[in-house]
Image (cartoon, rainbow, N blue to C red):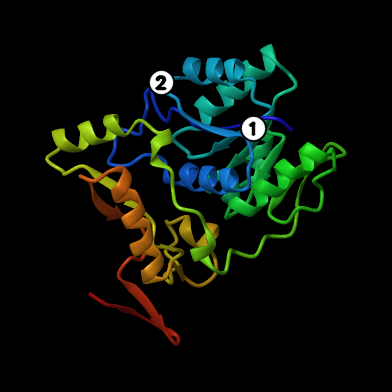
Amino acid sequence: MGKMLLLSPPLYCERHLRRSFQPPLNLLYLYAYLRAKNLEVELFEADSIEDAVEEILEKGADLVGIPLYYASLNNVYSIVEQVRNRNSTIKFVAGGPCLTMEPERMMQEGNFDFGVIGEGEETLYELCEALTKGVAPDDIDGLVCRQNGRIEANTRRKPISNLDELPFLDFTVVDNDYYFDFQEKSGVPKTLFLNSSRGCSFRCSYCCTPVLWPGPVRRYSPQRMVDEIRYQLKIFPEVEFGFCDDSFFQTEVGSKNFLSW
């Protein structure tokens, strides 16, 4: 396999829903991990279906990774169909909450080649390695594949136990001026957003987090977070920092949940 493209899809009305306070953190974490493994990968935030299709074809990507949200499904399905009509050799791997919650439905409706259930870094890297070596990815934990005309989900992958081992994010690959401008117009200081943990001890029925990360909350160490903030400040010296954790103030003690402020 040659090049991989991580695509942030348009989420509604052909418009870019990333009109919020932060870029797509999920893709930034995947991008940083794959780059640290010396893979050729790019990240693109699409403003429309047309933008996405042309970027995929122009970049000559061999594998395209797309996160799935219910607000993006029709747009993503259209992107995959249009690309396949013009280049049938490009493979697509889907991830995100929708794929994890409904893998068979998403694979069928979207005509994806692969799907990643749950945490994506290690699974996606192993998929890229298998495709590069020409090895069938049938036994990769966390992966959903098409086998003999059927959709088969492999064993769920164990979550990364030590988040401190993950590389720092590279915010230079997204349009920070766009986000900073939006923040300032909303009366918010220029802010970079990070995660300091993954998961949540609560099991709310309306939330996808218990499905994406069913185990206990995992946290970066305080020193690791300080190190990353210092690293980012060297590149963006005037920014402030926000955190997008599901349970930023939550700690787990025994069988009870506590909030610490």
> Could you say whether the residue bearing mark 2 is in a helix, strand or loop?
loop
Q: Identify which residue is drawn at 51% across, 64% down.
A: 163
Residue 244 shows in this picture:
no
Q: Amino acid at mark 1?
A: Glu
Q: CA distance from mark 2 to mark 1?
A: 20 Å
Q: Identify which residue is drawn at 54% across, 68% down.
A: 162
**Is 133 above or below relative to 49?**
below
The quarter holding residue 171 reads top left
> Could you say which disc has been placed on residue 223 in the image?
none
Task: Identify the residue at the far right of this view.
Answer: 148
The earlier-in-sequence mark between 2 and 1 is: 2
Question: Observer-nearest residue: 152 or 213?
Answer: 213
| Badge 1: residue crowd in 10 Å (few <14, some 14–19, many ≥20) | few
Task: Identify the residue at the far bottom of this view.
Answer: 254
Residue 222 located left or right of residue 1: left
Residue 214 located left or right of residue 184: right
Residue 195 located left or right of residue 54: left
Question: Observer-nearest residue: 206 or 188?
Answer: 188
> Could you say which disc has been placed on residue 14 in the image?
2
Looking at the rendered image, the quarter that the N terminus falls into is top right
| Residue 97: percent from left, percent from top | 52, 48
Looking at the rendered image, the quarter that the C terminus falls into is bottom left
| Residue 65: percent from left, percent from top | 59, 36
Q: Amino acid at mark 2?
A: Glu
Q: Identify which residue is drawn at 54% across, 15% down.
A: 54
| Residue 21: percent from left, percent from top | 27, 41
Residue position for label 1 = 109
Question: Observer-nearest residue: 145 or 7?
Answer: 7
Residue 67 located left or right of residue 39: left
> Could you say whether the residue bearing mark 1 is in a helix, strand or loop?
helix
| Badge 2: residue crowd in 10 Å (few <14, some 14–19, many ≥20) | some
